[in-house]
Image: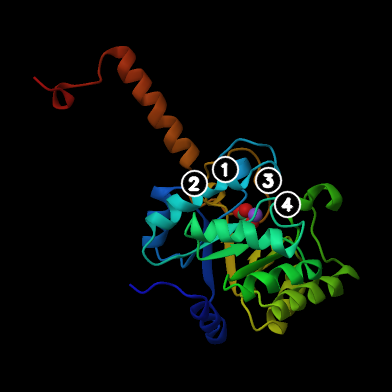
Amino acid sequence: GRKVRIHHLRELKERGEAWPMLTAYDMYTAELFDEAGIPVLLVGDSASNNVYGYDTSLPVTVDELLPLVRAVTRSVKRALVVADLPFGSYQLSPEQALETSVRFLKEGRAHAVKLEGGHHFAPHVRALTAAGIPVMGHIGFTPQSEHILGGYRVQGRGETGEALVADALALQEAGAFSVVMEMVPAELAKQVTHELRIPTIGIGAGPDCDAQVLVWQDLAGLRRGKAPRFVKRYADMAGILSKAATDFAEDVRRGEFPAAEHTFH
Ligand code: KIV
Ligand code: NA
């Protein structure tokens, strides 16, 4: 099939066809999601707490994310691969954002980058776009700012809704090709989606966004414990893997693995 390009995503918006996005951090998930027809894969900084075992998305570094981006881009045929810029790798200046993004495109072979923030980051988006790098924005609840936002909380309620709309418009004006909205009231997300020419991608932002994104370990039920309200578990991978490991352990302890068919003579 044909490679997914940013203009295809704009065309889907114009036709009113919703599309899915998933995170991916390695070869098998990238291959499977690409073959399942997921047009956009995000190597999220959520690798921080879904791959590397940190408790938040803040600690993960460019050097930790780059090999994951490379693995995903090597493993897809069609999907557009977006590399998330981690905390501290772009906030200093548009120049820093460009330097980091160039690494993700040259070394990681990513097709686009994503960064968190509203109108304050319009100059960063403009610099990247001018350099030929497509940028996905991310507004609403932005995990890299959890300490200033006071934890995982819905953003844009009441009077702050107008500021969120202005942030979305500023990102579009600066050249962003799409914008993620995280934990935003559905009514506000719908309004932003109508006001923007570029696609909106929701996570906890209701059904009226142009696209929807989930972290794959959440979708697959690999992450245990209480999931956020916006997560739907489509499988019980934690259960499947846990059973496989305990079954294997039991077989080994009983001397039932390896059997004759697994053995060379
Ligand atoms: O890092 C991530 O997984 C994300 C998505 C949830 C949008 O930013
Ligand atoms: Na992220």
Q: What percent of the width, then of the height, locates residue 16?
A: 55, 83
The answer to whether residue 93 of the structure is visible from this angle is: yes
Q: Which is in the foreground here, disc 3 or disc 2?
A: 2
| Figure colour scheme | rainbow
In terms of secondary structure, where does tag 4 sit? helix
Which image quadrant: the N terminus? bottom left
Q: Nearer the viewer, residue 249 or 142?
A: 142
Marks 4/2: CA–CA distance: 22 Å
Q: Residue at x 69, y 82 (%)?
A: 196
Q: Amino acid at mark 2?
A: Pro
Mark 4 or mark 1: name the one nearer the start of the chain: 1
Question: Callout 3: few (<14), some (14-19), or many (20+) C-alpha neighbours within 10 Å?
Answer: many
Q: Amino acid at mark 3?
A: Ser
Mark 3 or mark 4: name the one nearer the start of the chain: 3
Q: Which is in the foreground here, disc 1 or disc 3?
A: 1
Residue 143 circle label:
4
Question: Callout 1: few (<14), some (14-19), or many (20+) C-alpha neighbours within 10 Å?
Answer: some
In terms of secondary structure, where does tag 2 sit? helix
Marks 4/1: CA–CA distance: 18 Å
Q: Are marks 3 and 4 in contact (CB under 8 Å)?
A: yes
Residue 64 circle label:
1
Is 150 situated left or right of 175 in this image? right
Q: What percent of the width, then of the height, locates residue 64?
A: 57, 43
Q: Residue at x 70, y 78 (%)?
A: 172
Q: What percent of the width, then of the height, locates residue 152?
A: 77, 50
On the image, numbered disc 3 is attached to which residue? 57
Query: Cβ of disc 3 within 8 Å of ligand 2?
Result: yes
Q: Amino acid at mark 4?
A: Pro
